[in-house]
């Protein structure tokens, strides 16, 4: 720079060639080497002075890292991937109406809202769901406690929760207990780790309430939306489609709810399909976020409302089962099965996929994110076929046998329910009880329900 060397003075200026080098001349000071450069791209003045004092090797490395991050950021938000041809992010900076156009920064408001939804859920379960459960006769009591025994406890924790016949005989000789008594101990010990029916009722009532409310809001919102009656309106003037207040609230509330499910999954009832449901929630959040950033929100509202149509019926059937209203449970499940099959195998492919694949191709043409979005929707349709087959099989058995049978894919609750119903007609170690506990509301308590939500039911894309 015209005979000047980049080096800071105490006042932050440049050092000339004739200036002294050293502490008194504003050069590098003696002492321990400075630490690593601070992270970030916006530097306060004090940090900027430290940055100028770093060795040149460290500054070059930090500059290279910043450049790599810049390239990654540019690739992540590439206009060639996200937007149709001849459209840039600058074109979508206009105010539009309401909230303008969808922006990625809008997603940040979801996280505090998800925390709020989770807090509302805790209050709802305590002050509304729990009194309702007690009103329908669900007891606020845990399972029968197993008799304390150090030897059996060690086997239960370290070896197996389901001992075979050979191990039972060995434990019988070691403890001088009857084999039947040891089997009874393991059964009650397993039940101690299972959540009570009251907890499951409260969880299902919260989901039922939210699904029903968000479905009613979605129907009310879409009823006055032109793309509900003519799906070609989803692509008219795309992507210059302003974001209205109602559409913004619909999208953000759905996304916040699924983020709250991600949080609460670690505190809710642990199920066998925990990992699958975790991936399912993650995929749902990804699809909702993807369609929002890409401004495919119009068709996204159709997909969300379509999937919400059957969710509250499943939760209602579970509530009826926990309350031991078996006939109501069976009826609700059959209705749920019919609506699930009609919406996922009928309306979804012939209404939703038709507009995302063919009408959008005709009106806006394909581009990279268009291919990805439709690929995800097609994968979802394959899952719909699998889930519909599983549900139809269970519903068919319900019609033939007169009850909803236990699902082979049910969660860890299932074994506790079966064991609890077995023990409800017997004493702690198999003694018969004649108090009529096996019959509730005029129906046999041994009629098993599909305990958990089939993976992917109620998926919102």
Image (cartoon, helix red, strand yellow):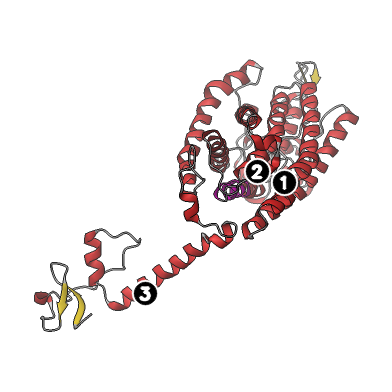
Within 10 Å of disc 3 (Cα), the crowding (few <14, some 14-19, many 20+) is: few
In percent of width and height, residue 133 lies at 62, 21
- Magenta segment, which residues? 281-293
Quadrant (top left/top right/bottom left/bottom right) for the N terminus: bottom left
Left-right relation of 407 to 119? right
Is residue 163 visible from the viewing direction of this image? no
Quadrant (top left/top right/bottom left/bottom right) for the C terminus: top right
Identify the residue position indicated by label 3 in the image: 61
Name the residue nearer the viewer: 407 or 118.
118
Q: Residue at left 77%, top 50%?
A: 382
Q: Earlier in the sequence, mark 2 or mark 3?
A: 3
Between label 3 and label 1, give the one nearer the viewer: 1
Identify the residue position indicated by label 2 in the image: 234
| Secondary structure character of the magenta stretch overall | helix
Name the residue nearer the viewer: 293 or 456.
293
Identify the residue position indicated by label 1 in the image: 355
In percent of width and height, residue 60 lies at 34, 76
């Amino acid at each position: 720079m015209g005979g000047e060397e980049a080096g800071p003075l105490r006042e932050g200026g440049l050092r000339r060639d004739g200036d002294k080098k050293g502490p008194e001349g504003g050069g590098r000071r003696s002492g321990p080497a400075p630490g690593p450069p601070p992270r970030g791209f916006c530097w306060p003045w004090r940090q900027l002075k430290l940055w100028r004092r770093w060795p040149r090797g460290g500054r070059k490395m930090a500059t290279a890292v910043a450049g790599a991050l810049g390239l990654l950021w540019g690739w992540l938000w590439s206009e060639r991937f996200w937007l149709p041809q001849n459209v840039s992010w600058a074109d979508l900076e206009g105010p539009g109406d309401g909230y303008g156009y969808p922006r990625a920064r809008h997603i940040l408001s979801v996280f505090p809202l998800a925390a709020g939804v989770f807090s509302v859920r805790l209050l709802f379960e305590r002050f509304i769901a729990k009194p309702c459960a007690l009103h329908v006769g669900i007891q606020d009591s845990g399972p029968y406690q197993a008799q304390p025994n150090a030897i059996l406890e060690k086997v239960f924790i370290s070896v197996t929760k389901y001992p075979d016949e050979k191990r039972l005989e060995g434990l019988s000789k070691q403890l001088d207990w009857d084999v039947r008594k040891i089997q009874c101990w393991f059964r009650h010990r397993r039940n101690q780790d299972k959540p009570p029916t009251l907890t499951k009722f409260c969880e299902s009532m919260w989901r039922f309430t939210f699904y029903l409310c968000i479905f009613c809001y979605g129907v009310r919102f879409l009823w006055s939306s032109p793309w509900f009656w003519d799906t070609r309106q989803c692509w008219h003037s795309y992507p210059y489609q302003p974001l209205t207040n109602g559409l913004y609230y619909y999208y953000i509330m759905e996304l916040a709810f699924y983020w709250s499910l991600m949080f609460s999954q670690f505190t809710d009832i642990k199920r066998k399909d925990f990992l699958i449901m975790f991936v399912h929630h993650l995929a749902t959040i990804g699809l909702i976020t993807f369609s929002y950033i890409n401004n495919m929100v119009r068709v996204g509202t159709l997909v969300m409302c379509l999937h919400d149509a059957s969710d509250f019926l499943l939760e209602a059937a579970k509530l009826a089962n926990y309350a031991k209203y078996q006939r109501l449970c069976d009826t609700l499940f059959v209705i749920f099965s019919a609506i699930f099959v009609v919406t996922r195998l009928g309306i979804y492919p012939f209404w939703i996929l038709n507009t995302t694949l063919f009408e959008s191709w005709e009106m806006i043409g394909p581009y990279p994110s268009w291919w990805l979005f439709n690929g995800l929707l097609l994968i979802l349709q394959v899952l719909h076929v699998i889930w519909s087959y599983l549900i139809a099989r269970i519903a068919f058995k319900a019609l033939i046998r007169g009850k909803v049978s236990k699902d082979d894919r049910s969660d860890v609750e299932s074994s506790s329910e079966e064991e609890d119903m077995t023990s409800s007609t017997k004493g702690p170690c198999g003694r018969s009880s004649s108090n009529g506990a096996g019959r509730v509301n005029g129906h046999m308590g041994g009629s098993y329900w599909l305990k958990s939500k089939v993976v992917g039911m109620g998926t919102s894309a």
